[in-house]
Image: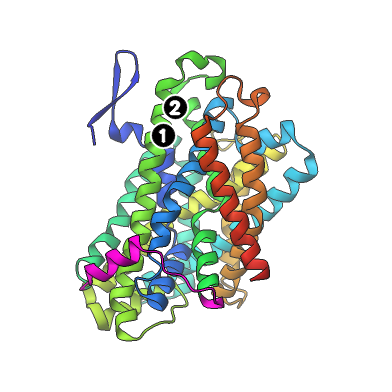
Amino acid sequence: MPEKLLTEPGERRSLLEVLGPGLVTGAADDDPSGIGTYSQVGAQFGYGMAWTMLFGFPLLASIQAICARIGATTGRGIAHNLRRHYPPALLRTMVMLLLIANVINLGADLGAMGAALGLLVPGPVLGFTVAFGVVSILAEVFISYTRYARILKWTTLSLFSYVAVVFVAGVDWGAALRGIVIPSFAFDREHSMALVAVFGTTISPYLFFWQAGQEVEEQHRRHTKPLCIAPRTAGPELKRIRTDTLVGMGFSHLTALFIIIATAATLNAHGVTEVTSAAQAADALRPIAGNLAFALFAIGIIGTGMLAVPVLAGSAAYAVSETFNWTEGLDRKPREAKAFYAVIALATLGGVALNFTGIDPMRALYWAAVVNGLLAPPLMVVTMMIARNPRIMGRLTIPRRLAFGGWLSTAVMWAIALLFLFG
């Protein structure tokens, strides 16, 4: 991969500068609840469902690139474009479903982080959960956007812990490679539910809102205008978005693949086929793969949680603020965007509160997957309509190849939603 990429005539930026919203979005996709899902797939089916990561990569990369282009081209997020060009009832329904799903996901992720820290350090799990929630709120509200974006970038390094786990897990690489490149699927309830869980976890609506919103934030930070205003000069920026998204989604899928391989090589190989949480997956690794694998897995849960919680809360804040035309943005001071930051705080505290209700976190996560699975397909249709509409995108409507990828992703998610409902 080249060290420098051309962005403007005569200007070159390092790869670390080019990577931003796409990298963070991709890494946040591997949140603790996602880790729990991938761990369950590896434990239950061994290497047999690893092919879903190879198949899913172009689907996620396509729809996320489209969301990023919408934000960069229009200078507005997904919800803002929905409000300007589509019926209010459609917008409010989707934002409400997003908010519900995000709060449930926040609860599951914060609970998993607290449980993971409890495995490493003796102490009250609920106390750890509250502490993680409070720290996330304070960081998102009071740290400047430039510094916070940099922190989120470096937090993605926590995902490398899962790469390390694979190399101490005793993987049968021949079987793993067959599982990756040769699709294996039985049309029974177990495989169908696993497929729904994997794609419902991987292609999630909150990622759409976050990446589009972050592209708008980047324009504010660099004091640049939306691409639709000067479409002839948009080429280098669209190239940056493409690189950022491909690397970020590739990173996301590679990490998820390593989690499946690691749990297949350890848990499944030793007869452990039921995983109810990411923390349980980490604990189950200890007697099989040793303390190092256990510690790396647990640390990864905490690191990815610190990345995913702000993304979940932030995407909810973008969507709600754009719906009501409130001042928004992480580049704003708290006094300038009180409602925006209030949504971040309330969504995060709502997730914390779920851990005190006695609700089974995996059951809550199941219903979050239901909401996400039902919300994603219609939202993807609307997103594609925005991206192909010259009244919204001007001369920068998405090209045919990207449109094909986006519509294919949409069709797959519709099929999975129908499988979920009627399978």
Image coordinates of residue 336 in percent, x first then y, are: 60, 32
Residue at mark 1: 242
Residue 186 covered by magenta stretch: yes
Number of marks in the rendered image: 2
259 vs 390, left or right, is left
SS for callout 1: helix
Magenta residues span: 170-190
- Amino acid identity at mark 2: Leu
Q: Residue drawn 78% across and 40% down?
A: 88
Mark 1 closeness class: few <14, some 14–19, many ≥20 residues within 10 Å = many
365 vs 41, left or right, is right
Residue 52 appears anywhere in the view: yes
176 vs 82, left or right, is left
Residue 206 covered by magenta stretch: no
Image coordinates of residue 31 in percent, x first then y, are: 44, 59
| Quadrant of image for the N terminus | top left
- Amino acid identity at mark 1: Arg
Query: Residue 238: which disc?
Result: 2
Q: Residue drawn 49% across and 55% down?
A: 309
On the image, which quarter does residue 349 sit in? bottom right
Between marks 2 and 1, how big is the CA–CA gap?
6 Å
Q: Are marks 2 and 1 in contact (CB under 8 Å)?
A: yes
SS for callout 2: helix
| Quadrant of image for the C terminus | bottom right
77 vs 125, left or right, is right
Image coordinates of residue 140 in percent, x first then y, are: 48, 45
- Residue placed most toward the observer, 71 or 144: 71
Image coordinates of residue 86 in percent, x first then y, are: 75, 36
Mark 2 closeness class: few <14, some 14–19, many ≥20 residues within 10 Å = some
- Residue placed most toward the observer, 283 or 138: 283
